[in-house]
Amino acid sequence: MNASVVVEKINHKLEKLGGYAKIPLQRSGYFTARLVKKGVKVDNLGNQSFLPWIVFKEVINLLNRNHGVAIRGDAMNAKLGDEGLPLDSVEGHIASVVYGKEVGDSVFRRITPIACILVWAGICESKPKKLVLLK
């Protein structure tokens, strides 16, 4: 899937809803996502609520390189490059490529809103510990 198409799909879906949506969480509840000029703001990341479009593009680039599947990564319990947070995990890839983190760095956890937005938009499905690109 083309990364730019993914951005257009998320953008279009949010625009149809007035730029604001309640996004279901994996287990229960929801968070809100609001369309802004260069990405999406979410209300479940505290003061680091902005997810630029490049985050979603890079997730798709990673999934495309890995035949549509990537492990989520565990930024809560591992440092970048550790077994729980490899560079080819969604969290690890974003931390390295988008946010400039290096091996051994602690990483701010962003996987929940990113994965949930991609699932909500019909782009991916969430499997245990993995994110899978829909065909």
Image (cartoon, rainbow, N blue to C red):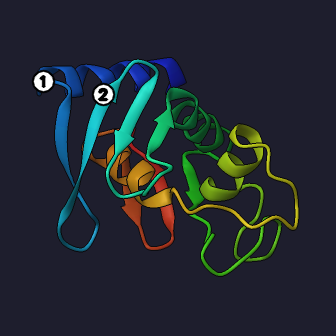
Residue at (31%, 52%) from the top-left corner? 43
Residue 106 appearing in the image: yes
- Residue at mark 1: 18
SS at mark 1?
loop
Foreground residue among 63 and 80: 80
Number of callouts:
2
Find out whether the residues at labels 2 and 1 contact each other: C-beta distance under 8 Å. Answer: no
- Mark number for residue 125? none
Residue 120 on image: x %, y %:
25, 45
Residue 121 appearing in the image: no
Q: Is residue 74 above or below residue 134?
A: below
Residue 39 on image: x %, y %:
43, 27
Q: Give the quadrant of the C terminus.
A: top left
Quarter residue 33 falls in: top left
- Mark 1: amino acid: Gly
Foreground residue among 114 and 68: 114
**Mark 1 Cα shell of 10 Å, populated few (<14), some (14-19), many (≥20):** few
28 on left or right of 116 = left
67 on left or right of 97 = left
Work out which residue is located at the far bottom of the displayed protein and give it: 77
SS at mark 2?
strand
Residue at (56%, 53%) from the top-left corner? 69
Residue at (41%, 66%) from the top-left corner? 127
- Mark 2: amino acid: Leu
**Mark 2 Cα shell of 10 Å, populated few (<14), some (14-19), many (≥20):** many
Q: Is residue 104 above or below residue 68?
A: below
Residue 103 on image: x %, y %:
88, 61
Q: Earlier in the sequence, mark 2 or mark 1?
A: 1
Residue 63 on image: x %, y %:
59, 43
Label 2 to label 1: alpha-carbon separation: 9 Å
- Mark number for residue 35? 2
